[in-house]
Amino acid sequence: MALTDLPAEWIEEETHPADIAAHLSEMEPDEAWPLMKALPLDVQAEVFGYLHPETQGPLIDKMSRKQVSALITEMDADDRADVFNRLSEEQQEKLMPGLAQVERENIRKLAAYEEGTAGAIMTSDYVTLSPDLTAKRAIEQLRHEAPDKETIYRAYVVDAERRLIGTVRLQELILAEPSTPISELMEEDPIHVLVDEDQEQVARMIARYDIIAIPVVDHEHHLVGIVTHDDAIDTLEEEATEDFQKLGASGAIGQSVRRAGISMLYRARIGWLVLLVFGNLLSGFGIAYFEDTIAAHLALIFFLPLLIASGGNAGSQASTLMVRAMATGDVRSKDWARLLGREALVSLLLGLSMAVAVSGLGFFRGGPEIAAVVAMSMVCIVIVGSLIGMSLPFILSRFNLDPATASAPLVTSIADATGVVIYFSIATLVLFT
Amino acid sequence: MALTDLPAEWIEEETHPADIAAHLSEMEPDEAWPLMKALPLDVQAEVFGYLHPETQGPLIDKMSRKQVSALITEMDADDRADVFNRLSEEQQEKLMPGLAQVERENIRKLAAYEEGTAGAIMTSDYVTLSPDLTAKRAIEQLRHEAPDKETIYRAYVVDAERRLIGTVRLQELILAEPSTPISELMEEDPIHVLVDEDQEQVARMIARYDIIAIPVVDHEHHLVGIVTHDDAIDTLEEEATEDFQKLGASGAIGQSVRRAGISMLYRARIGWLVLLVFGNLLSGFGIAYFEDTIAAHLALIFFLPLLIASGGNAGSQASTLMVRAMATGDVRSKDWARLLGREALVSLLLGLSMAVAVSGLGFFRGGPEIAAVVAMSMVCIVIVGSLIGMSLPFILSRFNLDPATASAPLVTSIADATGVVIYFSIATLVLFT
């Protein structure tokens, strides 16, 4: 199969634009653009909307002014604004003159909202109805406007000042007597979000209420857009990916990990690694402080990695559980005190079980005194590590930092340093008195 | 506000069932049931569908046979089967006799599919059309059947044997000439999934193609259900939560973390903690093996936590990035070799940077030889830790295990043991030759 045959096949077999996009993004821009150009313009626009930003940029560089304008005009309003936001200034200038006045304004408006807000992910592809229309006239209006709209299953009812007063489902319009006014069919005061609401909150509301789209209003309650279910899924997936990366102590990669470059990955990872080195120095200083104890009982060193790692592991478990529960809204800041009590109890049980598991070994390698030191240390270290890991996300959130900053490596570093001090303090107390 | 006033307020203010459910789940079953009973039956059913399974069970115990049957009959087909699956055998027996024959069969059918498959999350609330209907007759049929259906925006076209042959959107029916046959309006051979497909894959397809619902067929291509966008969001969120918990080295909690009991949390966490103790013993043996080296140069101990932690941290970063990228489909098994090369390069740069950061300290605390040992060890440990962390998810996936099992604590344990051996081997080589 020659590469140049692909568009014909794609069209004949009605390949989904998302799948075409996946193929194109595996290619170099030089190969991809001729293939894409051979597609009908409406398919091009859909395919382009599915491409990663890293692929969109180089493709635009291959296009002429006219081609860019034609493509962008064909796209959905929200995809269009997203593309525009990611273009270089040079590329933006290439694009703007070719667009109609109304599209230029629409892009400027949608592109003006801050990243991460409802405004940045909303679309202007929806239908508004006046409350005094009849069901029959409303259906006619939908028929007229709908083919271009991303979603027509729910229309939004606005007053003369474009303030949101209700919503009505296509289903209800069809079922109703043709002469019924919209004001009688609509659901009043619908669920909505403010335009500067955090995008993750917006997505969670769509998930919570099982709705297809949520209307977005400005501070005067004017309808300015809607956020649809597909953007909600994408947002939740992106936010989860970002939290994963933070929990692994990387910066957010913000793009495909498979295609991320070496310098991008280096920059995302070096910061925390170096910071944590200085955190781990504390453990070193702790050990240095107890050098006499260690020199007198070298057997103690054997248990060091095991004990401090256990504190870090228990702490990582606790912090990960909390970070995710806070992200999904399962746990909120006010739950801290109650959950702290539960964590104390759980970690006591965990610590006791592990103390039993290692004390035999302590006896075997160092006698009864070492066994006692190891067992006592294990209980204390697991409890302290768990409480630190469990509390850190709450503390970060209190200071308006992302709870996901409480990464496993950070919790481990703190638990390690605490563990060194606990272990050798108990050892010094038991073995030298 | 007296608690007994709540249902009246909920009804007057048209509180969303999801919000009512959130309130009820904060209460004891003894308080919650009287409030719920006061709601109209259709609201009760919706509210019940939004409740967590942990709240549903105790509530059912409060109800009479008749109340349970009335409630369950009113629910959506997929929610009904979910509830049924989670009931105790006793509760299931309480429920069945009160249901109509057709509902009993429907429940048995939906409840029979294995957890985690498309069959388990699909619903039977959809409309099927015959290809020889006209658009006008199709709209009439939708009018007749639609009010009960979860989604009518897309109807499914099936042949006489109920095999899926196409889909048609409500929008197209309305826009079409009334006499056009469905067979001309429908989109043929629509995207679909098999009933035993993994639920996460199904959800990812809905996300990928930006669709509201995906039809589910059996192995003879008979339409057996649809999975809707709201179940796709819930599935992706649940799978992400499970991966977070695994990456934190917990078992999957499978319920609200806030409300999880002490014994549940203990059981989810103790397994990995004890397993990792034995992993960490390896580090202890490593140290014991090099006791002479340590006794001769006690200054080496100061750098031990710092060096082995750095390997674990770099490894945790690498494994977390891979686990999430594999879960979202960004990275696949076949990418391993190529990404290994990139990881080697990135980790070399990371290791060199960190060697610079600590070698000054090594010089200051132990002289030039110790500085050289620490710097060399850092580079090797960071590279080895990164390559282990990056490869482990691929290896697990090769053995059909969940890549998310490559938790930060597991990677840290392996990297720690390797780090001890690398550090003291280099130290022995440099300092004793």
Image (cartoon, coloured by chain):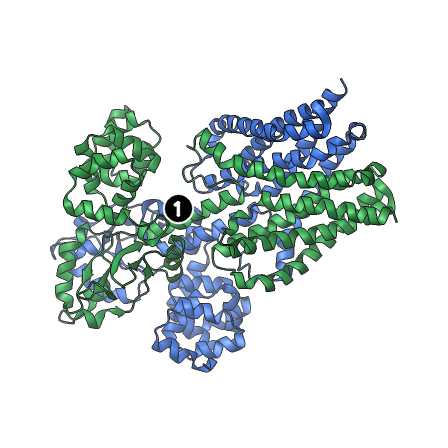
Chain colours: A blue, B green
Q: Is residue A272 visible?
A: no
Q: In x, y percent, where is residue A25?
A: 49, 69
Of residue A213 and residue B242, the one placed in the foreground of this image is: B242
CA neighbours of label 1 inside 10 A, class few (<14), some (14 to 19), many (20+): some
Q: Residue at x 49, y 51 (%)?
A: B402
Q: In x, y percent, where is residue B334?
A: 54, 64
Q: In x, y percent, where is residue A198?
A: 44, 47
For the N terminus of chain A, give its image quadrant.
bottom left
The correct choice, above or below, for B71 with respect to A376 in the image is below
Chain of the residue under the numbered disc 1 shown in the image? A
Of residue A283 and residue B10, the one placed in the foreground of this image is: A283
Which residue bears the numbered disc 1?
Answer: A204
B57 lies left or right of A387: left
Which picture quadrant has residue A10?
Answer: bottom left
Q: Going by the picture, which residue comes out furthest to the top?
A: A433
Q: Is residue B263 visible?
A: yes
Of residue A208 and residue A345, the one placed in the foreground of this image is: A345
Disc 1, SS: helix
How many labels, in total? 1
Q: Residue at x 13, y 53 (%)?
A: A180
Q: In x, y percent, where is residue A414?
A: 64, 36
Q: Going by the picture, which residue comes out furthest to the front?
A: A364
Which picture quadrant has residue B197?
Answer: bottom left
For the C terminus of chain A, give its image quadrant.
top right
For the residue marked with disc 1, what is the amino acid?
A: Arg
Q: Residue at x 50, y 25 (%)?
A: A341
Of residue A107 and residue B77, the one placed in the foreground of this image is: B77
